């Protein structure tokens, strides 16, 4: 196999080896090359001590921020490269960076501190792989396996648990059984991982093609940082629409959604309020009245706990809140929703509703999806025709209202909204003369409005 190494990385390897130091590409870039996908960051490891690395690149720009951990960032023409001295790690107390590191002289020692076999492969300038833990074979088999004893490795650093699940979801790799068992057993290690770090891994995991499978296999891990998922995982739903329990329904709905973070989060959380709303009627059928509002509240709390940003949190909670509303393919209905959510979010709501129905009995819900397609087509028509659905599109504005004799102040907004209301309803067209007449009537009926 030949590898395409960017010029900057090749230059760094050459300078270090010419100076007599071992130097290798290592970690994610080697893994990605072996997987046959583009690599995104090119890390170099070397036997040279940090000050020796700096001496090799004297005269070149570099950044010393990682010096404590043995990392010098070298700025090449095509980008920045981290060059790290072979090291072993001390204790991890922040779940990411070890408190202290010890420089070592053997590559194998450096590779043995790395999390998974696929991430513990080094590649030299001349294309030789150093792969003491069988990472290449694991990549070929699509397998995630800890370097060394899985229990110990997860106990050192709880973030590795989430990394394993994320790699599994994104690459579609299976997690080797001892590693998998250790993930379940050590899930409490997540308690010491910062919410931001869990968030970063979770966000990548949920948008991966294997996200559903990971949720199916590791609900206990997800419940560790989001205990609110617990009752959903065990929820049974005896209801003609539902052929699945709450968790399997959620997973199928998530799998049916596009791989967009907001949509995937909305699907994961759309029914989170169901357990709290469950009632069973005399016929033994389960109902979940009012669950969307309860789900939206719980989702808000959960997204805050994991420090999702405000924009994501707001979009997700709105989609959760409205995921169950009935929609009809009529201009009037569509204009109201466009007014409430705006086009982008309304199209997202259609995706959510489609995905939700995919998590139910497919034959029974086919008609529902056909209707949703009609709503989408109608929405596109309303937008293409530039129909009015917001104050901004109205053929009159505040100046017209003032000119009709309404005094400046909140009354102006009230009149405009009353006009918009009629246009949304389809009672009158969005045409200036018609609207001016209406404004005049409203001004006359209530001069102070
Ligand atoms: P990606 O960059 O695609 O997310 P990556 O494996 O390159 O994946 P980085 O965070 O860039 O992830 O880490 C680079 C390398 O450092 C990894 O390949 C692995 O060898 C090592 N590594 C990263 N995080 C850990 C960890 N928590 N424990 C042990 N080794 C780690
Ligand atoms: Mg990386």
Image (cartoon, helix red, strand yellow):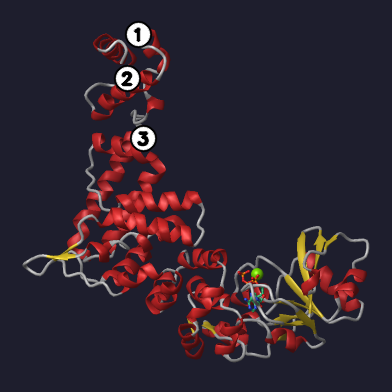
Kindly identify the residue that appears in the image at 33 percent across and 22 percent down. 414
Q: Quadrant of residue 52?
A: bottom right
Quickly name the residue at label 3: 383
* Percent x, y of residue 261: 46, 58
Ligand 1 neighbours mark 1 (CB distance < 8 Å): no
Question: Label 2: which residue?
Answer: 415
Q: Secondary structure at mark 2?
A: helix
Report the side of 320 relative to 70 (left or right): left
Q: Is mark 2 within 8 Å of ligand 1?
A: no
Q: Earlier in the sequence, mark 2 or mark 3?
A: 3
Ligand 2 image position (quadrant): bottom right
Residue in view at x 37 percent, y 49 percent: 318
Residue 50: give x, y in percent of width and height: 85, 74
Task: Answer whether labels 2 and 1 touch (C-beta < 8 Å).
Answer: yes
Of discs 1 and 3, which sits in the foreground? 1
CA gap, disc 1 to disc 3?
Answer: 30 Å
Above or below: residue 25 compared with residue 425: below
Q: Which residue is mark 1?
A: 404
Whether 314 is drawn above or below 388: the answer is: below
Quarter of the picture holding the C terminus: top left
**Residue mark closest to the camera, 2 vs 3:** 2
């Amino acid at each position: 196999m030949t590898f395409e190494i960017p010029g900057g990385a090749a230059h760094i390897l050459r300078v270090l080896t010419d100076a007599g130091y071992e130097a290798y590409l290592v970690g994610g870039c080697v893994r990605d090359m072996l997987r046959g996908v583009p690599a995104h960051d090119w890390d170099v490891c070397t036997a040279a001590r940090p000050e020796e690395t700096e001496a090799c690149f004297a005269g070149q720009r570099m950044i010393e921020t990682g010096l404590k951990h043995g990392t010098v960032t070298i700025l090449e023409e095509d980008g920045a490269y981290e060059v790290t001295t072979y090291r072993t790690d001390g204790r991890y107390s922040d779940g990411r960076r070890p408190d202290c590191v010890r420089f070592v002289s053997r590559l194998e020692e450096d590779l043995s501190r790395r999390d998974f076999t696929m991430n513990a492969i080094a590649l030299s300038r001349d294309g030789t792989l150093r792969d003491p833990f069988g990472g290449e074979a694991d990549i070929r088999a699509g397998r995630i396996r800890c370097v060394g004893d899985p229990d110990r490795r997860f106990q050192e650093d709880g973030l590795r648990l989430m990394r394993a699940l994320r790699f599994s979801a994104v690459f579609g790799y299976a997690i080797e059984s001892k590693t998998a068992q250790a993930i379940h057993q050590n899930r409490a290690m997540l308690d010491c991982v910062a919410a931001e770090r869990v968030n970063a891994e979770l966000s990548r995991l949920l948008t991966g093609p294997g996200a559903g499978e990971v949720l199916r296999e590791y609900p206990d891990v997800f419940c560790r940082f989001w205990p609110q998922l617990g009752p959903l995982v065990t929820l049974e739903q005896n209801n003609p629409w539902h052929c699945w329990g709450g968790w399997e329904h959620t997973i199928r709905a998530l799998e049916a959604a596009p791989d967009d973070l907001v949509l995937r989060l909305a699907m994961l959380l759309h029914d989170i309020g169901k357990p709290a709303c469950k009632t069973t009627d005399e016929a033994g059928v389960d109902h979940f009245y009012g669950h969307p509002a309860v789900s939206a509240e719980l989702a808000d709390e959960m997204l805050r706990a994991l420090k999702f940003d405000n924009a994501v949190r707001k979009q997700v909670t709105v989609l959760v809140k409205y995921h169950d509303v009935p929609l009809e393919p009529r201009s009037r209905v569509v204009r109201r929703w466009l007014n409430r959510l705006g086009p982008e979010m309304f199209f997202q709501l259609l995706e959510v509703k489609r995905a939700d129905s995919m998590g139910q009995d497919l034959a029974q819900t086919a008609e529902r999806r056909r209707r949703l397609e009609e709503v989408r087509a109608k929405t596109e028509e309303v937008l293409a025709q530039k129909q009015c659905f917001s104050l901004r599109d109205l053929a009159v504005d505040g100046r017209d209202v003032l000119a009709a004799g309404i005094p400046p102040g909140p009354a102006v907004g009230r009149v405009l909204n009353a006009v918009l209301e009629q246009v949304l309803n389809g009672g009158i067209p969005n045409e200036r003369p018609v609207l001016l007449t209406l404004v005049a009537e409203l001004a006359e009926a209530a001069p102070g409005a």
